[in-house]
Image (cartoon, rainbow, N blue to C red):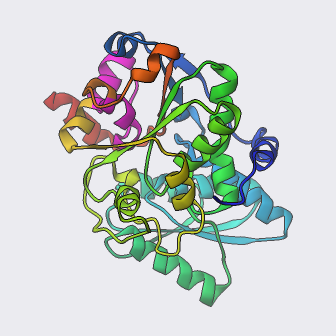
Amino acid sequence: MSVLSLADVYAARRRIQQRVLRTPLVESHALSAVANAPVYLKLETVQPTGSFKLRGATNALVRLAEAGCTRVVTASTGNHGRAVAHAARALGIEAAVCMSSLVPSNKVEAVRALGAQAHIVGESQDDAQHEAQRLVREEGYAYVPPFDHLDVIAGQATIGIEIVEDLPDVAHIAAPLSGGGLFSGVAFAAKQIAPSVRLTGVTMARGAAMHASLAAGKPVLVDERETLADSLGGGIGLDNRHTFSLTRELIDEVILLDEVSIARGIVHAYEAEHLVLEGAAAVGIAALIAGRLSIGAAARGPIVLIVTGANIDMNQHRRIVGAA
């Protein structure tokens, strides 16, 4: 296991508490009826950048600013880049965000609107990663990884603390699974405080890098494919230092969803929960309404679904809802 400690997570919370929101945990009566158990939604959608990513990015950038850093770069599928741009602007730091051509245009424009440089490179997250590393080598930027960094993980882990504080009898948490920064952070914090809680990672069937790596027993490369859950795309890095080992240690279950199921999750969120969600944020809902989420643990407590982001292209959202 990595060298992350619960003290690191509490320190991250103190560091970011004036810059991010403590997000609401609300019961979904519609989903509770489906599960025959209390189901709560952790609404990271209300963060200023519309995504949980603001937590980890802010924690990492505050620490860099304290060390005198003035220029940062990251690679992103959109939401982390937006979070880095937001935090950098607040701290007076120059930011560059490298993204592939698969990143939706609304997310690219949101990065630019926050004053960051947007570098569109290649057709995969790995291509964007290579460009970010070039800027580090050749132009002296400090790199802020999207997930595999202890400060980023600790920032995301503050979600786990909030869940357990607000719902001490929580039995099951389902979180979107991609590079593992969110999942490993939440799982680490929640299980440190409530060891019996069950942690499920939910992701798309198309190009699920962490799932493939867990199956192989080591980080592996996957082909990145277009998906409604675009925020979950990209590899985990063959030199992954933290999130792979943490996820492997802490995960109880992985669920892979097809595109139809993800679309149904988006539609349910809109029609029953009055939430506009991107595909990656709707995967927990999708897994539950598809009957894929193991809910045996619900007999001893509630289920929490982490709802991670609202930054869907609205034209795409209208097409999905209209086709339902």
Q: Main secondary structure of the magenta part?
A: helix
Foreground residue, 264 or 111? 264
Would you say residue 285 sits in the magenta stretch? yes
Residue depicted at 43% across the width and 53% down the height:
178
The relative height of residue 285 versus residue 262 in the rendered view (above or below) is: above
Foreground residue, 222 or 49? 222
Q: Horizontal placement of 33 versus 195: left or right?
A: left
The relative height of residue 231 versus residue 159 in the rendered view (above or below) is: below
| Residue 249 x/y as whole percent | 54, 51
- Which span of residues is magenta-colored? 265-287
The reply to whether residue 22 is visible in this rendering is no
Residue depicted at 48% across the width and 39% down the height:
308
The relative height of residue 119 versus residue 104 in the rendered view (above or below) is: below
| Residue 280 x/y as whole percent | 38, 43
| Residue 208 x/y as whole percent | 33, 56
The reply to whether residue 31 is visible in this rendering is yes
Q: Horizontal placement of 242 versus 281: left or right?
A: right
* Quadrant of the drawing holding the C terminus: top left
- Please identify the quarter of the rendering in which residue 290 is found: top left
Would you say residue 304 sits in the magenta stretch? no
Furthest-left residue in view?
A: 323
Q: Horizontal placement of 136 versus 307: left or right?
A: right
| Residue 307 x/y as whole percent | 47, 33
The relative height of residue 183 versus residue 69 in the rendered view (above or below) is: above
Q: Horizontal placement of 200 versus 133: left or right?
A: left
